[in-house]
Structures are given as structure tokens and as C-alpha cells.
């Protein structure tokens, strides 16, 4: 039986859940991380020494890192298969890396201050929002006139980017409206896999 360890309030777990659902891969999700604990248990650390979520376990095969899990889903599922053409595939990889190294880190301080801190540091929030606005500008410009992040079909880059956009668009603070980003996000958020992955309130 395939198991995914992690809580749905984690943006990285959201990516994995959405990817598994879109790929049609059955799994059991085990609550872990945050208030659920588990991640510091010796048995969990034996699977994932980072003590983070998500972790995918499948008949003794263990995989962590959410975008690695997305890539694995793409290998297993024709519905999420990476483009065969080298340059298109490279663009999928580019946007996966950009989400993980640029967009999500830009908004991290704002998220932590607004959701995980009793007395938010407004200077940290404002600096983080400014960084996030710069990233949102890039994504909005890229999505202008496009239905999907890469090429003409839904794929794992859309999942990674849309989970990050979900968090960005739900931060309780003022942001510049990005029409192309909003249109793309709302269309993807209506997919069954997204409704499952993004069901929990931001927390």
C-alpha cells in the first residue's frame, strides 16, 4: 500500500497530494508534521532524516522532497507525463525549481509572521510581501495568454506553481491584483485534485 506522510496545511504536502490524485495513484495519507508530530519519531526519521513532510513510502521505496514526488508521479502517469521535447521538458524543470527556490521562499516570512506568530513583525511581513510581489509579477507575465505553465497541457509545473499561488493569494494582506495569475489559478483550483489538496484553510 502506498502511503503519503504529511498534513494538508503544508504547501509541500499539497503538491504531493495533488500530484498523486491527478496521476490516479491510490494512496493512504498519514497525518504527520506540525501539531500531529510523528516527524521526530525514530521510525519516521529512518525514512526521512530531514524530519520534514511529505514522505512517500511504497513497498519499501521511500521518496521525500515534494517536487521529486511530482516528478515520480509524472514518470508513472501518462496524465502527467513530462514533455518528450527536450526544451519543453527543461521549461517544466525550470518552473519547478523557480517555485522551490524563488516564489515560495519570497513569501515565507510573511506566511510565518501572519500565521505562526502571535505578534507579527510588520517590517518582516512588508519585506516578504515586496519579494513576493516581484515573483508574482514574473509569474503573471509568463501566464499572460497561456492556459498552462508549459505548453498546451496541464502538468506538474502547474501543480507546484498553483500550490504556491494558493498560499500567496490567501495571505491576509494587501497585494497587487495579477489578472493572468488569478485566471490561471482559479481554473486549476476547480480541478478535482486541487479541491482535495487545497481543502484545508491556510494555517
Image (cartoon, grey):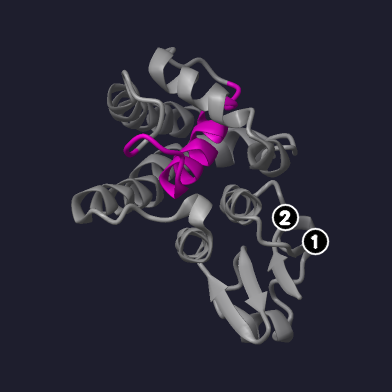
Q: Compared to 56, does 101 lie above or below?
A: above
Residue name at image x 47 percent, y 46 percent = 160
Closer to the camera in the image, 108 or 176: 176
Whole-percent x, y for residue 25 in the image: 66, 61
Q: Which residue is mark 1?
A: 36
Q: Pointer 2: residues within 10 angstroms few (<14), some, or many (20+)?
A: many
Dominant SS of magenta comes to helix
Residue range of the region highlighted in magenta in the rendering = 150-172
Whole-percent x, y for residue 95 in the image: 33, 45
Queried whether the magenta region covers residue 169, the answer comes back as yes
Between the residue at mark 1 and the residue at mark 2, the CA separation in whole angstroms equals: 8 Å
Closer to the camera in the image, 54 or 190: 190
Marker count (numbered): 2
Q: Are marks 1 and 2 in contact (CB under 8 Å)?
A: yes
Marking on residue 7: 2
Whole-percent x, y for residue 157 in the image: 41, 45
Q: Earlier in the sequence, mark 1 or mark 2?
A: 2
Amino acid at each position: 500500500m502506498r502511503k503519503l506522510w504529511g498534513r494538508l496545511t503544508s504547501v509541500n504536502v499539497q503538491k504531493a497530494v495533488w500530484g498523486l490524485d491527478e496521476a490516479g495513484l491510490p494512496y493512504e495519507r498519514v497525518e504527520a508534521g506540525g501539531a500531529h508530530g510523528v516527524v521526530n519519531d525514530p521510525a519516521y526519521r529512518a525514512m526521512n532524516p530531514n524530519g520534514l513532510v511529505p514522505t512517500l513510502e511504497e513497498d519499501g521505496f521511500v521518496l521525500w522532497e515534494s517536487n521529486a514526488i511530482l516528478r515520480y508521479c509524472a514518470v508513472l502517469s501518462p496524465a502527467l507525463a513530462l514533455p518528450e521535447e527536450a526544451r519543453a521538458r527543461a521549461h517544466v524543470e525550470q518552473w519547478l525549481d523557480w517555485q522551490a527556490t524563488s516564489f515560495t521562499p519570497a513569501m515565507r516570512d510573511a506566511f510565518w509572521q501572519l500565521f505562526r506568530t502571535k505578534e507579527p513583525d510588520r517590517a518582516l511581513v512588508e519585506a516578504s510581501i515586496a519579494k513576493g510581489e516581484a515573483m508574482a509579477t514574473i509569474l503573471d507575465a509568463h501566464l499572460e495568454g497561456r492556459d498552462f505553465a508549459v505548453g498546451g497541457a496541464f502538468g506538474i509545473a502547474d501543480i507546484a506553481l498553483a500550490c504556491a499561488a494558493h498560499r500567496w493569494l490567501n495571505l491576509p494582506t494587501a497585494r497587487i491584483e495579477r489578472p493572468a495569475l488569478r485566471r490561471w489559478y482559479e481554473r486549476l483550483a476547480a480541478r478535482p485534485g486541487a479541491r482535495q489538496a487545497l481543502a484545508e484553510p491556510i494555517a
